[in-house]
Amino acid sequence: MRLTTKSRYGTRLILDLAVYGRGKPVPLSEISSRQNISLKYLEQLTSKLKKAGLITSHRGPFGGHMLARPPEDISVGSIVRILEESTVITDCAEQENKTCSVCDKAGECLSRWVWVEASRAMFDCLDKITIAGLLANGNKKIKKK
């Protein structure tokens, strides 16, 4: 699986909200400027993240977006699952699906378990990385400079 800009930019969006949205909504225009991500693209991402319950929106002159959960309760794995259209390395790596449209051997393929396990391992890793952990790690690196 190749992670798209959706996951990378979505993670940056969530990190920005964690840093600048403590106790107040953050306008997307500010995030767009800080992260150098187009406003239209951020709107698409926030729509999915809001629907999934990771962020909330507030209207009005002092409106914007905030995290709906504490940073320690948001994993990179959850962001990727929400924003990516597919979360498997290959078509046949769907754990319940033993067949795929690409390979006629998927049901009996001896190597299929490699792709299933690789997908599982990737998400096991991404699920352990929280937004709070990224912020703490980033703060350590900034202080060392």
Image: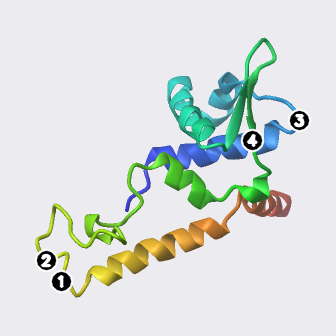
The residue under label 2 is 105
Point out the frontmost of discs 2 and 4. Answer: 2
Decide which of tag 2 and tag 3 comes sooner along the chain.
Answer: 3
Q: Nearer the viewer, residue 26 or 101?
A: 101
The residue under label 4 is 67
Tell which residue pokes out farthest to the bottom in this image: 110
Q: CA distance from mark 1 to mark 3?
A: 54 Å
Above or below for 19 versus 103: above
- What type is the residue that disc 1 sits on? Glu
Secondary structure under the numbered disc 1 in the rendered image: loop
Decide which of tag 2 and tag 4 comes sooner along the chain.
Answer: 4
Crowd band around label 2 with a 10 angstrom C-alpha radius: few (<14), some (14–19), many (20+):
some
Please report contact status of discs 3 and 4: CB closer than 8 Å, yes or no.
no
The residue under label 3 is 23
Please report contact status of discs 1 and 2: CB closer than 8 Å, yes or no.
yes
Please report contact status of discs 2 and 4: CB closer than 8 Å, yes or no.
no
Tell which residue pokes out farthest to the right in this image: 23
The residue under label 1 is 108
Residue drawn at x 71%, y 26% as measured from the top left: 30
Point out the frontmost of discs 4 and 1. Answer: 1
Q: Position of residue 99 (x, y in %)?
A: 21, 69
- What type is the residue that disc 2 sits on? Lys
Q: Nearer the viewer, residue 16 or 22?
A: 22
- What type is the residue that disc 3 sits on? Gly
Crowd band around label 3 with a 10 angstrom C-alpha radius: few (<14), some (14–19), many (20+):
few
